[in-house]
Amino acid sequence: MAARMDLDGRPIKPMTICMIGAGGFIGSHLCEKLMAETPHKVLALDVYNDKIKHLLEPDSLPWAGRIEFHRINIKHDSRLEGLIKMADLTINLAAICTPADYNTRPLDTIYSNFIDALPVVKYCSENNKRLIHFSTCEVYGKTIGSFLPKDSPLRKDPAYYVLKEDTSPCIFGSIEKQRWSYACAKQLIERLIYAEGAENGLDFTIVRPFNWIGPRMDFIPGIDGPSEGVPRVLACFSNNLLRREPLKLVDGGQSQRTFVYIKDAIEAVLLMIENPDRANGHIFNVGNPNNEVTVRQLAEMMTQVYTKVTGEPMLQSPSIDVSSKEFYGEGYDDSDKRIPDMTIINKQLGWNPKTSLWDLLESTLTYQHRTYAEAIKKSMAKPTAS
């Protein structure tokens, strides 16, 4: 493998990366990229390894020996500090990040995203190890624009809704709206990491993902996840399409979101890993402001893409409206718009996303149809116990 150069033309030294949550959606794509394109070694920590099994065996793989799987629950495992010490860089991807859990399992959500992340930050700081911590675009909460009168012309002014890492406030709902338990826990760990940097010299980078989409994301309920679970919007819609059910639009599907392709986003993470001088001390939005749609528009586009991918006809009534209380339970609330400002990542790392919304949906739905269609047919054909 030819020597890799960083953005300033310096050769990149091979490093050892301790990746917590390596077995998840983002971790699996990042491990793939690191194995295929770099000389770096990965200590892959997670409770499950299904999504990275193809990287771990057989022993004849070209990167054999450069990725080690350690089955660890970071809540209570004395091996964690030793593994962080063995690495040059720790990447923490571990989190509960399913909106349906935020108001139904708020304690687990707060513990997972704040309490369980504390030892990781502490060990990195005490051992002078660099940390890349994955946060969320949810830390921004609601936009300033959402508080303006409905007919205010200022609502169209980007200054009131585009989210900037260094200037946008973090605005959450009231305490009884437990949906904000996730965003609040994520914001507090960000503040702690930032304080460790300021007071104790921790080298850190914080990543705020804006809806990263692609193969292996989330789960399909009852197939590779709990049957009563509710994954994020795109996997919910995929599940409906695969089962030939109408797509459920929460509160009319008026919320606006942007979506970025996982492979584009992983390029950004690799730039952070290999350019510490440009990434340390920064918080980065990683999203695609060009792929903005309402949830209703997303449902319409996914229905069209699915029809193209599978050749199956559309349902007569492709979507139905449901209330957020009915869908998510009591205590749900939402942010109106999530559009990332890309100035900082563009300036520091020269990164821009490339993939259109249609193309990323086509890639994801092709994968999901290929992976899940048979399993879903079997599950639906099983006779139910009377």
Image: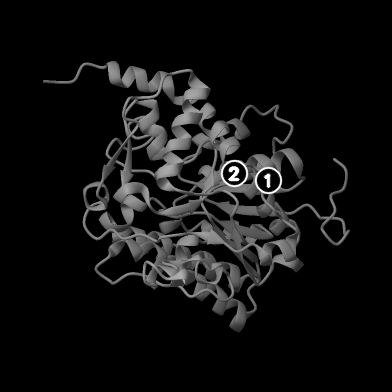
CA neighbours of label 1 inside 10 A, class few (<14), some (14 to 19), many (20+): few
Residue 80 in the image, given as x and y percentages of width and height: 52, 58
Q: Quadrant of residue 274?
A: bottom right
* Numbered disc 1: secondary structure: loop
Residue 223 percent across, percent down from the top left: 37, 29
* Residue 23 shows in this picture: no
In this view of the protein, which residue sits in the foreground, 323 or 44? 323
Given residues 313 and 87, the one toward you in this image is 313
Q: Residue at x 55, y 46 (%)?
A: 26
Whether residues under marks 1 and 2 lie with C-beta atoms below 8 angstroms apart, the answer is yes
Q: Which residue is labeled 2 in the image?
A: 261
Residue highlighted by disc 1: 354
Q: Nearer the viewer, mark 1 or mark 2?
A: 1
Answer with left or right where residue 320 lies relative to residue 53.
Answer: left
> Would residue 146 be visible to someone looking at this image?
yes
Kindly state the secondary structure of the residue where label 2 is placed. strand
Q: Residue most toward the left? A: 386
Q: Which mark is residue 282?
A: none
Compared to residue 74, the image places residue 160 above or below, namely below
Q: Quadrant of the C terminus?
A: top left
Give me the residue at 38% from left, 33% from top. 239
Marks 1 and 2, the one that precedes in the sequence: 2
In the image, what residue type sits under mark 1?
A: Lys
- At 31% from the left and 21% from the top, the residue drawn is 379
- Residue placed farthest to the bottom in the image? 199
Q: Local crowd at mark 2 within 10 Å, few (<14), some, or many (≥20)?
A: many
Snapshot quadrant of residue 298? top left
Color theme of the render: one colour
User: Residue 336, percent across and down?
Assistant: 41, 60
